[in-house]
Amino acid sequence: EYNEKFQYASNCIKTSKYNIVTFLPVNLFEQFQEVANTYFLFLLILQLIPQISSLSWFTTIVPLVLVLTITAVKDATDDYFRHKSDNQVNNRQSQVLIGGVLRQEQWMNVRVGDIIKLENNQFVAADLLLLCSSEPHGLCYIETAELDGETNMKVRQATPVTSELADISTLARFDGEVICEPPNNKLDKFGGTLYWKENKYPLSNQNMLLRGCVLRNTEWCFGLVVFAGGTVEEQLSKGQIFGFLVCMGVILAIGNAIWEHEVGVCFQIYLPWDEGVHSAVFSGFLSFWSYIIILNTVVPISLYVSVEVIRLGHSYFINWDKKMYCAKRRTPAEARTTTLNEELGQIEYIFSDKTGTLTQNIMVFSKCSVNGHSYGEPEPVDFSFNPLADPGFQFWDPSLLEAVKLGDPHVHEFFRLLSLCHTVMSEEKSEGELYYKAQSPDEGALVTAARNFGFVFRSRTPKTITVHELGRAITYQLLAILDFNNIRKRMSVIVRSPEGKIRLYCKGADTILLERLQPSNQDLTNVTTDHLNEYAGEGLRTLVLACKDLEESYYEDWAERLRRASGAPEAREDRMARLYDEVEHDMTLLGATAIEDKLQQGVPETIAILTLANIKIWVLTGDKQETAVNIGYSCKMLTDDMTEVFVVTGHTVLEVREELRKAREKMMDGSRSMGNGFSYQEKLSSSKLTSVLEAIAGEYALVINGHSLAHALEADMEVEFLETACACKAVICCRVTPLQKAQVVELVKKYKKAVTLAIGDGANDVSMIKTAHIGVGISGQEGIQAVLASDYSFSQFKFLQRLLLVHGRWSYLRMCKFLCYFFYKNFAFTMVHFWFGFFCGFSAQTVYDQYFITLYNIVYTSLPVLAMGVFDQDVPEQRSMEYPKLYEPGQLNLLFNKREFFICIAQGIYTSVLMFFIPYGVFADATRDDGAQLADYQSFAVTVATSLVIVVSVQIGLDTGFWTAINHFFIWGSLAAYFAILFAMHSDGLFQLFPNQFRFVGNAQNTLAQPTVWLTIALTTVVCIMPVVAFRFLKLDLKPELSDTVRYTQLVRKKQKPQHRCARRGGYVGGSRRSGYAFSHQEGFGELIMSGKNMRLSSLTLAGFTARPSAAWIETLRRKKGGESSPDSAAKG
C-alpha cells in the first residue's frame, strides 16, 4: 500500500505497437507519414475535382488502397509476433512473498516493493536488491550473457544486515526503505541507500540482480523489487523524376494556355470552357494539375510495393539458405531487416571482432615446453589410466605422459603448478565427476590439462587446495594469492606443502616473467624462448611458468608487511604491488604453455576470397597486440609475403603522428623503388595523396594499439590515420574499447563514403554493429546482444562470404535491373500522353482507356518485373564464389547510377515516341477491310496499348538472365491476362450492365481483327526492340563485362574439370616473438577466494562457467572514385 502511492511502473513488458482498437487509425497515420503515400493521397484529392481530373478517381485509389492494405497486413503480422513474445515473457511465473506465504505470480503482476524468491537457473523477473541467499555471506552467482554478452560468472552479495534473513517469517516482517537513482542504461553502476531499523546502509551494483540475468549455482535467493518494467530500445532519381514531371506539366500547361488563346477561342460555341474558367491562363493552370495527375505514372505507387516485395523475397532466400545453416547449433541465417539487402552487394569495408567472431572462443591446450623439451607431436594420448580425466580433452604427444609416469620431477612440478596456480572452482556432482568453472577459458584449459596428466585439482577452501597427484590426495595450505591484473600480467600463489616447504608458483606473460628469472640457467631460457617463438608463430596463446622456494623466516616477514599494506588507508594497491614484485624475483623457469584459440572453420579462406573481391577487412579487438597479430597470421590477413607490417604503439600525439608519417613515407618509397612512377612530395594535396597511396605497389598492413588509436582519432590527426590505414591491405586495432570501435567505423563512413559492414558476437560489439551501414551478429558463445542489434545474423564467420558474394551481389544486381526496367516501362507508358497533348489541344485527354491505366502497373506488367527482381541472376552461385571480382561493379555502383538512370529513361522516351507516332502515321491513311476509315480514337488507343504491352514484355524477356518456370508463367501469363481483360471490358455484357463506365464496347474485337493493326503492332515492336538487341550484341562482342566472360567461359569449359582457386598458404617465421599471453580473467577473484566468501558450506566448491583478373575500366573507375571521395574533398564538401 505504501508503494502504490508512488505509481511505479508496471512489470508488464510491451513491445507491441497496436491493439484491435488502435490498429487502423494508428497504422494509417504511420503510413501517411511516408512522403509517397501522402503524394498519392494528394493526387486522389485532385482527381475528385471535376475541373481538373480527366481520369476517374479509382485509377489512383485502387493502387493506393492495395499498397496500404499490403503494408497494414505486414505490420499486423509483425505486431502479432511482438504480442506473442510479450505474452510469453509476461506470463512467466515467479514466487512472490504475499502475506507471509510464497505465491505463484505472473511476471506482469510483480510490483515494486515485492519480495521474490528465485531458484537456480531461473531468470530474474525484475531489478532486485539481493536480500539473502542459500550461500554463505549472502552470496549468489549470476550469468549476464543476455545483458552484456559476457558468459563468465559474476558474484553478487547481499548487504550483511539482510543476509541473515533466511526464513520466510523474518522476510515477511522486513520493512526497509530503499532510496536510489532512477532507472538508467548503466549495467555496471548503481547507487542507493537502504534505511532500516533507523540505520543507513549504502547499496552498490554488487547488491543488485538485474532483470534478464540468470541465477546460477545458487539453490535460492530472495530479492526486493526495486525497478519494474522494461524499456524498448530496440536517392538520386526521386527528386529528378519529380522535377521532370513538373517540367512536362508546365510545358503542356503553357501549350494549353497558348492553344486556348489562339485556337480554342474560335470554337467556344461547341467547345465552351468549363464553368468557372474565364481565361486561357486559368485554363492552363487547371491543365497543369490535370497533367500532373495523368503523368504521375512515371513513378507509380506500385513501385514502392514492388521494391518491398523484392526485398522480402531476398530476405527469405537468406533465411532459407541451407548452406548458411549450422547443423551443430541448429541455427539458420536470419535477415532481421528487409531494407538493406542490395547494400550487401556494395560493401567496401568490413570491421570484425576477433574473439568469438574469427575464433571460436574455445581454448585448447595444444603444446608445451618443459625443461627445454617441446611436446605436441601429432599422435594422440590415451588417458584411460586416469579415472578422473576429462573425456573431452585431447593432447597429441604420448612422450609427455610417459615422462609423468616415469616420475620426471620437472614435468611433475610443471603440472603441479598448473593444478595449484589458478582461481578455478570445482564442483563434484557425483564421485569422480568433476566440473571446473573458471573466469577465463584459458585457465580452464590449463587446469584441465593438469587434470588429465594426473594432477587433478579436486577442491579448495579459503586456506587449502586439495590435489590428487597420480591418485594420491595431497592438501596444500594456501598462504596467499598474488592476483592477476593487466599491469602485472601474471598471477602467483604461495602454498605450503604437507612436508612444510613454502613455494611460490607463478604464471604470466613471457615478456614479464623472463625478466624475473634466475640468471644462472640462461641456456634453458634461450631454448624456451625459441619454443615460445615457434608457438607464437603458429598463432598460439603462450604463458611462461616459474617457481621459487621461500624461507620460513622470509615468508613470515613478507606476510606481515603484506598484512599491514592491505590495511593501509592510503596507497594500498601501490604498497601491495611493490611487495608482490619483491617476492616474484629470482624464480626458476619450469616451462611454457601454448593454448590454441581455435579459428572458426573456413575463416582464412573467407578472408582470402573477400580480399580478392576488393573488400578491406579491419579487425577491431579488445585483445592485446600479440594475440591479435597471431590470429592475423593464422587467418591469413597478415602474411610473410607482405612488404611490411607497420606497428603503431606511440603513447603521445607526436609519437603517433611520427609513426604514421614514417609508414606513409615507406609506402611511397617502396612504390618508387618498384618503378611505378609515383614521386612523393611534402606538399602533396590530401586528395592526391590518398589516391596515390591507394594505388601504391606492394602489400602493407597496419597494427595499432588502443592508446595510440585514441590519439589517432583526434580531429587533427584522423585524416592522416585514415590515409595510412586505407593504403594498407589489412588493419588490426588492438586493445580498443567499444566506443573506439564505433569511432573507427564512423571515421570511414565520414570520409570514404563507402558502404561499411561490422560483424561481432558480443555486447562489446553492439556500438560498432549499430554504427556501420550493415550490422551482422554471430550467434556464438557471448550471449545474443550482438544478434539483437544486428541486421543479419548467422553462426559462423565463413557464411559472410556467401552472404556478400552470392546474396548481396544478386540482391544488388536484381534491384538495379528491376529499377532500370521499371522506369523504362513507365516512361514508355506515360510519355505517350505527352506527345498526344500536342494533337489534342493540350486538353489533358488520355490516350488509353482508364481501365488500362489502372491495370497497367497492377496486373499487366507487375508480375514479370517482380519475377526478374526476385529470381534473376547473371552467373550461378558457384561462379560468384569462384570469381570474387564479379563483386566490384556493386562497390563502384556501376549498375544503377546517374548514367544508367538516364539511359533507361532515354530508352523509355524513345519507345514512347515510336509507340505514338508509328500508329499515328499508319492510321492517318489506313482503311479497314470494308474500305471504312480505320482512324478513330478508340482503335488508336487499343493499338497503342497492345503495342506497349507486347514491347515491354519482349524487353523484359531480353533483360531476364535466368529463366525459371515462374518467369515464363508471369511474362506470357500477363500477356494472356491483358488480352482476356481487354476483350472482357469491350464486351457487350459489361456495356449493358454499366453503359457509362465501359464505353469501348466492341472496339477490341473490331480493331484487332484488322491485319493493318497487327502489322502496325509488329512494326512498332521490331523498331523498338531491334536497336536494343543490336547494341547489346555489339557491347558483348567489343566490350564484354566480367560476368559475360564468366558465362562464356562456363559454356566453353563445361566439359572440363573445374579449376578451383586455392587460398595462398603461408605461415609466419620471424625473428621476433609474437607473444599471445593467454590470461583474461578479472582482477580481484583471488582476494574473494582467500576471504572464503565464495565457498559453499556443503562442498566448499563453486560451479558456474568454463565454460584478380579484372577489366582495366573497373580499375580506372576505382581510382577515379577513390580520388573523388578523398578525406580532403569530403571534408570540404
Image (tube, helix red, strand yellow):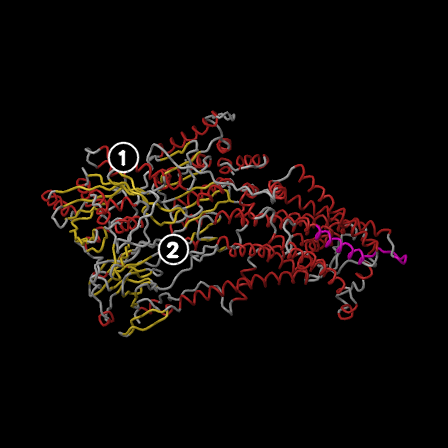
Q: Tell me residue 189's x, y (percent).
A: 31, 54
Q: Taking 340 as reference, is 587 left or right?
A: left
Neighbour tally class for label 1: few under 14, some 14-19, many 20 plus, Cα within 10 Å? some
The percent position of residue 896, horizontal first and vertical second, equals 60, 45
Q: Can you identify the residue that label 1 sits on?
A: 527
Q: Secondary structure at mark 1?
A: helix
**Residue 451, numbered label:** none
Q: Earlier in the sequence, mark 1 or mark 2?
A: 1
Q: Is residue 280 magenta?
A: no
Position of 579 with respect to 85 (left or right) is left
Q: Quadrant of residue 867?
A: bottom right
Count the marks: how many?
A: 2
Q: Is residue 576 visible?
A: yes
Residue behind mark 2: 783
Q: Main secondary structure of the magenta part?
A: helix
Residue 1012 x, y percent position in the rendering: 84, 53
Residue found at the far left of this picture: 553
Is 862 situated left or right of 380 in this image? right
Which quadrant would the N terminus be assigned to in this image? bottom left
How many other residues sit within 10 Å of disc 2, few (<14), some (14-19) or many (≥20)? many
Q: CA distance from mark 1 to mark 2?
A: 42 Å
Nearest the viewer among 862 and 545 is 545
Amino acid found under the numbered disc labelled 1: Val
Q: State yes or no: residue 936 in magenta.
A: yes
Q: Which residues are magenta?
A: 929-954
Amino acid at circle 2:
Gly
